[in-house]
Image (tube, rainbow, N blue to C red):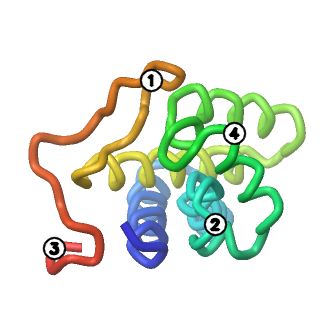
Amino acid sequence: MTGKTHIMGGVATCIALASITSYDQILLTAAGVAGSLIPDICHRGSKVGRKFPILSKVISGLSGHRTFTHSLLFLVIVGVLLSMFVPIQAVQVGVLVGIVSHLILDAATKNGIKLLYPSKVTIRFPFTNRIGGAVE
């Protein structure tokens, strides 16, 4: 999926969540947008990869694309770090929801994701979408 699609996924998910919770809608959604882009730090051509090229190169070199940063392990680590360093729960939840929306969208592509990393098992939906295609 493209960065724009991930942003829209994060926005849509966070707005839906905000409608059933008491989290601040603006904080939740802004954090969701950030979270929706974070997993692609492993791709040097992504929006976040271009903003942090050195970090992107290191992560890409260590684990490759759609592996560690597209896994439940990454989600748990980010959740722990957020709970330790970010006191605003709406921001914590927004980032995590954004990451989850990213993982779901990428699991809907032909290449899928390594959700159970370090296992090499690829997870993808039975229906997939071509990146940049008409469905996206």
Considering every residue shown, the one lying at the far left of the view is 127
Between label 4 and label 3, give the one nearer the viewer: 4
Residue flagged by tag 4: what amino acid is it? Leu
Between label 1 and label 2, give the one nearer the viewer: 2
Q: In this view, does 31 lie to the left or right of 127?
A: right
Up the image or down, 104 lies above or below 13; here it is above
Please tell me which of labels 4 and 2 falls first in the chain: 2
Instruction: Report the Cα–Cα distance between label 4 and label 3.
Output: 32 Å
Q: In which quarter of the image is the N terminus?
A: bottom left
Secondary structure of the residue carrying tag 4 is: helix
Instruction: Report the Cα–Cα distance between label 3 and label 2.
Output: 25 Å
Please tell me which of labels 4 and 3 falls first in the chain: 4
**Quadrant of residue 50 in the image?**
bottom right
Residue corresponding to mark 2: 44
Please tell me which of labels 1 and 2 falls first in the chain: 2
* Mark 4 neighbour class, 10 Å CA radius: few under 14, some 14 to 19, many 20 or more: few
Name the one closer to the observer, 127 or 101: 127
* Mark 3 neighbour class, 10 Å CA radius: few under 14, some 14 to 19, many 20 or more: few
The residue that appears at 41% across and 73% down in the rendered structure is 2
Q: Verify CB contact (< 8 Å) between mark 4 and mark 2.
A: no
Please tell me which of labels 3 and 2 falls first in the chain: 2
**Quadrant of residue 13 in the image?**
bottom left
Residue corresponding to mark 4: 62
* Mark 1 neighbour class, 10 Å CA radius: few under 14, some 14 to 19, many 20 or more: some
Residue corresponding to mark 3: 135
Residue flagged by tag 2: what amino acid is it? Arg
